Image (cartoon, rainbow, N blue to C red):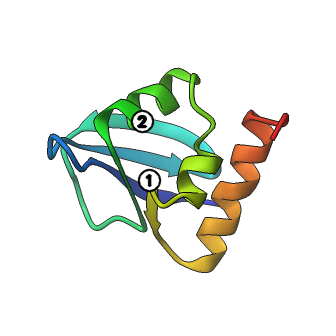
Amino acid sequence: DWSKLLHFVAEDTGDKFTMDVVKGEITAFEAGARGTPDIIVTASSEDLCDMFWGDLNPSQKYLDGLIKVKATQEDVVRLDAITMIIWPDV
């Protein structure tokens, strides 16, 4: 039962987005920052767009420090596992 509120922040434009995950399923995604997030992902607007279009595997950018994640260690591990499922070739 992985239910989390995520904020995505474009560090170059200041744009913010909110994603609701309820029991492992994305139930909402909207512009703006709503509520108190469990996870904050910060990156350039280009990297966020490429990631959401499926054109960017965020793993290397995360390792290089270009995508930052503020979350508990358990949630970071969960995001790593999700990334490995979506982009298995890395």
- Within 10 angstroms of label 1, few (less than 14), some, or many (20 or more) residues? some
Q: Is residue 54 visible?
A: yes
- In the rendered structure, the answer to whether residue 30 lies left or right of residue 1 reads left
Numbered label attached to residue 47: 2
Q: Name the secondary structure under disc 1.
A: loop
Q: Position of residue 84 (x, y in %)?
A: 78, 45
Q: Is residue 90 left or right of residue 15?
A: right
Image quadrant containing the N terminus:
bottom right
Of mark 2 and mark 1, the one earlier in the sequence is 2
Cα separation, mark 2 vs mark 1, equals: 9 Å
The amino acid marked with disc number 2 is: Asp
Q: Residue drawn 69% across and 57% down?
A: 80
Q: Residue at x 76, y 54 (%)?
A: 81
Q: Which residue is nearer to you in this view: 66 or 16?
A: 66
Q: Are marks 2 and 1 in contact (CB under 8 Å)?
A: yes
Q: Is residue 45 above or below residue 33?
A: above
- Relative to the observer, which residue lies in front, 25 or 74? 74
In terms of depth relative to the viewer, which is nearer, 51 or 38?
A: 51
Q: Measured from the top left, where is residue 73 in percent x and y?
A: 61, 78
Give x and y (percent) for residue 28: 40, 37
The secondary structure type at the circle numbered 2 is: helix
Residue ID at (24%, 61%) = 35
Whole-percent x and y of residue 23?
A: 63, 52
Query: Mark 1 = which residue?
Result: 66
Badge 1 amino acid: Leu
Q: Quadrant of the C terminus?
A: top right
Rendered view: 77 above or below 34: below
Q: Which mark is residue 40?
A: none
Badge 2 local density, few (<14 within 10 Å), some, or many (20+)? some
Query: Quadrant location of residue 75?
Result: bottom right
Left or right: 28 as drawn, with respect to 24: left
Specify whether residue 1 is in view: no
